[in-house]
């Protein structure tokens, strides 16, 4: 059981490094600005940098605590849940302009919920509805983020 915890530390850290690297590469063309006059890339790049530091710390801690019997920290890597979560995020990005934020968000939660086999379908559906409604209210109505509320053509 203890080896699984170490493996998860390394796996989680590697995933955080991968996500941070993606955002650092894709956000490099945005103007960073200064602390006084933040540009559009300031927050995403700063968060990606912090995410990379956290990922690196997790990988180092996981590898440092690995015993000689635990040479492969990725031995317990669960490919299906990882692909489901990454696929859900990708589909969210593709579906957002087509179906609108609430439906894309609900789809994200529903597909991501398949990654946790211990969840009952009713729990996942209720979570999808609550998260979709709550984040729609916060992101679009309260914060006024420019995301499509309804599908194209409505």
Image (spheres, rainbow, N blue to C red):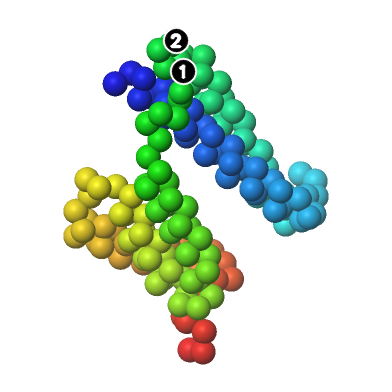
Q: Quadrant of the N terminus?
A: top left
Q: How much space separates mark 1 and mark 2, taking CA atoms? A: 6 Å
Residue 67: image location, x then y, percent: 43, 11
**Along the line of sight, which residue is nearer the eye, 113 or 128?**
113
Tell me: residue 82, above or below residue 112.
above
**Along the line of sight, which residue is nearer the eye, 21 or 74?**
74
Pointers 1 and 2 in contact (C-beta within 8 Å): yes
Tell me: residue 98, above or below residue 25.
below
Residue 45: image location, x then y, percent: 69, 46
Tell me: residue 42, above or below residue 13.
below
Checking the image for residue 71, the label placed there is 1
Residue 60: image location, x then y, percent: 55, 21
Q: Which residue is at a point 59% across and 37% down the rendered structure image?
A: 17
Q: Is residue 48 left or right of residue 123?
A: right
What secondary structure is found at the residue carrying circle 2?
Answer: loop
Q: Is residue 40 left or right of residue 6?
A: right
Q: Is residue 26 left or right of residue 67?
A: right
Q: Residues within 10 Å of mark 1 (few under 14, many from 20)?
A: few
Tell me: residue 22, above or below residue 98.
above
Q: Which residue is at a point 36% across and 20% down the rendered structure image?
A: 3
**Along the line of sight, which residue is nearer the eye, 37 or 65?**
65
Q: Residues within 10 Å of mark 2 (few under 14, many from 20)?
A: few
Q: Which residue is at a point 46% across and 23% down the rendered structure image?
A: 72
Checking the image for residue 7, the label placed there is none
What secondary structure is found at the residue carrying circle 1?
Answer: loop
Mark 2 — residue?
A: 68
């Amino acid at each position: 059981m203890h080896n699984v915890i170490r493996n998860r530390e390394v796996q989680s850290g590697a995933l955080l490094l991968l996500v941070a690297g993606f955002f650092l590469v894709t956000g490099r063309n945005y103007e960073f600005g200064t602390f006084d006059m933040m540009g559009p890339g300031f927050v995403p790049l700063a968060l990606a940098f912090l995410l990379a530091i956290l990922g690196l710390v997790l990988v180092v801690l996981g590898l440092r605590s690995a015993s000689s019997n635990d040479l492969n920290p990725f031995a317990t890597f669960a490919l299906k849940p990882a692909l489901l979560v990454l696929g859900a995020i990708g589909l969210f990005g593709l579906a957002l302009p087509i179906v609108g934020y609430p439906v894309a968000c609900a789809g994200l939660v529903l597909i991501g919920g398949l990654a946790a086999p211990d969840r009952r379908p009713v729990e996942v559906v209720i979570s999808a509805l609550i998260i979709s409604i709550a984040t729609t209210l916060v992101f679009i109505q309260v914060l006024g983020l420019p995301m499509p509320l309804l599908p194209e053509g409505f």
